[in-house]
Each structure stands twice: as C-alpha cells, then as structure tokens.
Image (cartoon, rainbow, N blue to C red):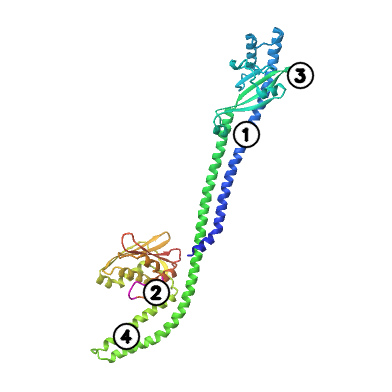
C-alpha cells in the first residue's frame, strides 16, 4: 500500500475535519461571549430597574416627609432642627414607616450645607462633606446613582462581590399644594439598596447558561468525534480497497504476461522433455537391468518428471484456473488430506490433531483446488519440524466466517523471511520453486477467502485461512 496515496486520498476529509472542529470551537467561544454579554445586559437592566425603583421610593418619601414632618414641625416649632431629639424621632418614624416594607439598606438626608441631618445610622448624623459629586448634582435638581462594590478583583469581575449596592441621590423638595413635587430643593436624599441577592441570581443564571452550553457542546463534540472516526475508517477502507484492487489489476496484468510467456516456454520445453523421458524409458527397457548404464536412465526419467512438475507449478501460478464452484465441506477436504498423508505421518513421527466444529457449514468451492491448497499447507507444517511433532488443525464458524487454523511447533518464521514469504520464486528449501504459497494464496483468493501467516507466542507458526459464509451453497 502506498502511504502517499492514502494521505492524498484522506487530505480533503482532514480539511473538512479541521474546519469542523475549528467551527465548533469558534461557536463555543462565540456562545460564551454572547452569554457574558447577555449577562451584562441583564445586570444593566437590573441596575436601571433598581435606579427607577429608588427614584419612586424617594418621590414617595419626599411626599411623606413634606406632609408628615416638614409642615407639622414647621408650624409647631417654627423651624426644622433635627438636632432636637423630638424632631429627629418624628423624622425617623416617618421615614421608617414609609420604607418599612421595602428593601432599603440605608437612608441619609443631607442639608443644603452637605451635612447629614438624618440617617438610619446615628453615627453618620452630623458628618460633613460626605455627599461628593452626586450630592452636588442632586442639589442642582439632578438625580443620579452609582454602583458600590466591595470584594476581590475576581469577585468583582465575575459579578459576585461580597457587597454590592446601588446608591441613589435625589433632591428633597418642597411641595406645592395640589401639584407634583416641583418646589425648591430643601436638601438631598440618599438611598442605598443592597443588590447582592439580585446579582447572585444573575451569576447563577450565567453559570447555568455556561454549563448548559458546555454540556451541549460536549455532546456535539462526541458526536463529531464519532462521525469523524467513522468517516476516517470509511475513507481508509475505501482507499485500501482501491489500492488492493489496483495491486490485483497490476498483478493480473503481470501474471497474464507471465502466463503467456510461461505457456509458450512450457510448450517448447514439454515437447522435447516428453521425447527425452520416453526415450530414456525405451532405452531402459532395452538395457541389461544389471548393467551400469541402467542407473543413468533412471536418473534421466526422474529428473524429467521433476522438471515437468516445476513447469506445472509455473503454469498453476501464472495462469490460475477459475474454481468449479460446488457445495463443499472443508472438514471433509482436510480429512482427505490427512488420510493421504497417513503413511508419511506414521513413518516420520507426525501427529495431526483436529478440532472441527460440529456445525461446520457448507461453502461453495472447488474441492480439488482446496485439497491441493491445504495439502501444501500441511506439508509445509511437517517440513518445519524435521524430527516430527504435533500439528493442530482447527475449523470454527465465527462472525460469518469459516476459519481454518493450522499450527505447528517448528522454529517459526524469521522477520526477514516473513517480508518475502509471498514473493514469487522465494524459497528457503534446497529444492523448490518458491511458488507453493503463491499457488495456495491464488486458490484461497479465488474462493473469496483470505490467508494470513504469523508466529505463535510460545513456539511455531500459525496459518489462518478464512472463507466468507454469505455465499449461496446450493
């Protein structure tokens, strides 16, 4: 398989994958930013709502103070002096009764000289120059508010300081009879509202939003990873399949050319080879059986047969024939192989132990070709143990595959041999064409099967042959 081809094939999909992941990250960051902005917007609305609420309270307080305190006290005492205990208590009663059901943390009333004349906290009464810019604005008839926060940098940044209040300054005016408050400014009213609970709720809402977004994005990420993995797997399988088909096409072209060449050469060799073999057999009949030249004739005949077998191997590898598909049982084919090898097994100390599934299915195949393939595999297993030994043959039905395993206790296959084991004409035997495994693979693949060689962990080699079971058997 060519890595560059796979990389080139997968490159467009990788671009899509990277773009998708980048888009997901951008969407996630954008959503977080939107949630932060929306939270800021909610806080701004809460601030404006609290400011309007404070102005309404101040207007109501202004009305009650003017009617229930300033007018009665002015008529009774002639002037307003909150340093007078009786006047202070009357003012305190009016203010507290007006605001008792509202969430007000602090109320301060300033004189026109920037002195706190009244406060919920008696310690602040009499404090001078405490109003600042907001006091001056209110003295000029302009109401204004400010947000007061106390806490660490991160607490303030996240919007959950330990203390957070809105302070509103508004003018305290005299009222004209039967008209809205529009008289001269008599002083300044400061109202402080604690917004800790409101901002805490907003923060919790923000946390819920971010957690929900994170959860949704996590699910999308998992789905995306699943889709990407599946897409990569499909792309890789298609690329491997395409390359496999390309290799098979190249191999088929090569074998076709080789087959034509071998067919022509074999024809030219077999004719004189047949003449040599028949002539040697004829000479042998005319020779004295006890003569010294009789052995030479035997050698000529034997080598002629061996050369004919080599040519047959060439033809079988270069021009594999199509199998004659018929219902076939692999267990019966291997049993026939074992019966054929029975004498050789006994003479050389081999034992073939079989483990065939009771429900071994029938496949469609060419029994003669499969017989040849498994005979070669069994002979290879025997040749890997020159002193004899145990060979395990297992047949199992697994995942719609018929699996045949042949295991020996030989020396195994070295890494250098494993790299070249499927190459034509490569052999480790003194006598052999190096085409045996190639012929076996051609037969297995002609039956839509697969063959795999590997070393066992403990000792020896393992051959795994698989046939698909999705083919019609009748």
Extent of the magenta region: 423-431
Specify which label sits upstream in the sequence, 4 or 2.
Answer: 4
Badge 3 marks a residue whose secondary structure is loop
User: Residue at the location (54% across, 61% down)?
Assistant: 9
Instruction: Tell me, yes or no, if residue 58 can be seen here.
Output: yes
The total number of labels drawn is 4
Q: Regarding mark 4 in the picture, which secondary structure is present there?
A: helix
Q: Please determine whether, in this image, residue 62 is positioned above or below residue 406.
A: above
Q: Which residue is mark 1?
A: 42
Counting other residues with Cα less than 10 Å from the Cα at mark 4, is it few (<14), some (14-19), or many (20 or more)? Answer: some
**Tag 1 near tag 4, CB within 8 Å:** no
* Front in this rendered view, residue 206 or 275: 206
Residue 422, position as x, y percentages in the image: 40, 69
Determine which residue is flagged by label 2.
425
Tell me if residue 233 comes above or below residue 434 in the rendering: above
- Residue under label 4, please give it: 300
Residue 366 visible within the image: no
First-in-chain label (3 vs 2): 3
Q: What residue does disc 3 label?
A: 179
Query: Closer to the camera: disc 4 or disc 2?
Result: 2
């Amino acid at each position: 398989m060519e890595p560059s081809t796979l990389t080139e094939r997968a490159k467009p999909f990788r671009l899509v994958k990277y773009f998708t992941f980048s888009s997901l990250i951008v969407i996630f960051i954008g959503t977080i930013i939107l949630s932060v902005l929306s939270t800021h917007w909610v806080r701004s609305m809460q601030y404006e709502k609290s400011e309007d609420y404070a102005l309404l309270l101040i207007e109501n307080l202004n009305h009650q103070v003017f009617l229930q305190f300033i007018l009665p006290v002015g008529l009774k005492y002639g002037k307003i002096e909150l340093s007078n205990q009786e006047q202070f208590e009357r003012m305190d009663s009016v203010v507290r009764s007006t605001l008792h059901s509202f969430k007000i943390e602090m109320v301060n009333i300033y004189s026109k000289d920037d002195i706190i004349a009244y406060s919920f906290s008696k310690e602040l009464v009499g404090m001078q120059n405490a109003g600042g810019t907001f006091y001056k604005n209110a003295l000029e008839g302009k109401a204004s508010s400010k947000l007061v926060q106390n806490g660490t940098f991160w607490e303030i940044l996240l919007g959950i300081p330990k203390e957070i209040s809105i302070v509103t300054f508004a003018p305290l005016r005299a009222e004209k009879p039967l008209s809205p408050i529009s008289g001269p400014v008599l002083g300044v009213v400061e109202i402080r509202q604690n917004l800790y609970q409101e901002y805490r709720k907003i923060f919790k809402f923000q946390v819920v939003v971010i957690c929900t977004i994170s959860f949704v994005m996590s699910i999308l990420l998992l789905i995306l990873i699943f889709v990407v993995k599946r897409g990569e797997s499909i792309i890789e399988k298609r690329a491997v399949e395409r390359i496999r088909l390309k290799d098979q096409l190249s191999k088929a072209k090569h074998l076709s050319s080789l087959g034509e060449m071998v067919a022509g050469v074999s024809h030219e060799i077999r004719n004189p080879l047949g003449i040599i073999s028949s002539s040697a057999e004829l000479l042998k009949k005319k020779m004295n059986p006890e003569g010294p030249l009789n052995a030479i004739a035997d050698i000529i005949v034997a080598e002629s047969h061996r050369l004919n077998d080599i040519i047959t191997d060439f033809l079988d590898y270069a021009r594999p024939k199509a199998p004659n598909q018929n219902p076939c049982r692999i267990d019966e084919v291997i049993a026939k192989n074992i019966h054929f090898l029975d004498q050789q097994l006994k003479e050389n100390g081999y034992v073939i132990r079989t483990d065939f599934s009771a429900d071994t299915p029938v496949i469609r195949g060419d029994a003669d070709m499969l017989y040849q393939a498994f005979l070669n595999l069994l002979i290879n297993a025997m040749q890997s143990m020159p002193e004899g030994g145990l060979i395990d043959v297992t047949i199992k039905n697994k995942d719609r595959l018929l699996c045949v395993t042949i295991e020996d206790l030989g020396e195994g296959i070295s890494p250098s041999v494993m790299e070249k084991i499927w190459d034509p004409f490569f052999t480790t035997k003194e006598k052999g064409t190096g085409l045996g495994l190639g012929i076996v693979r051609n037969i297995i693949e002609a039956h839509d099967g697969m063959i795999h060689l590997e070393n066992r962990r403990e000792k020896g080699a393992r051959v795994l042959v698989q046939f698909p079971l999705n083919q019609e058997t009748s």
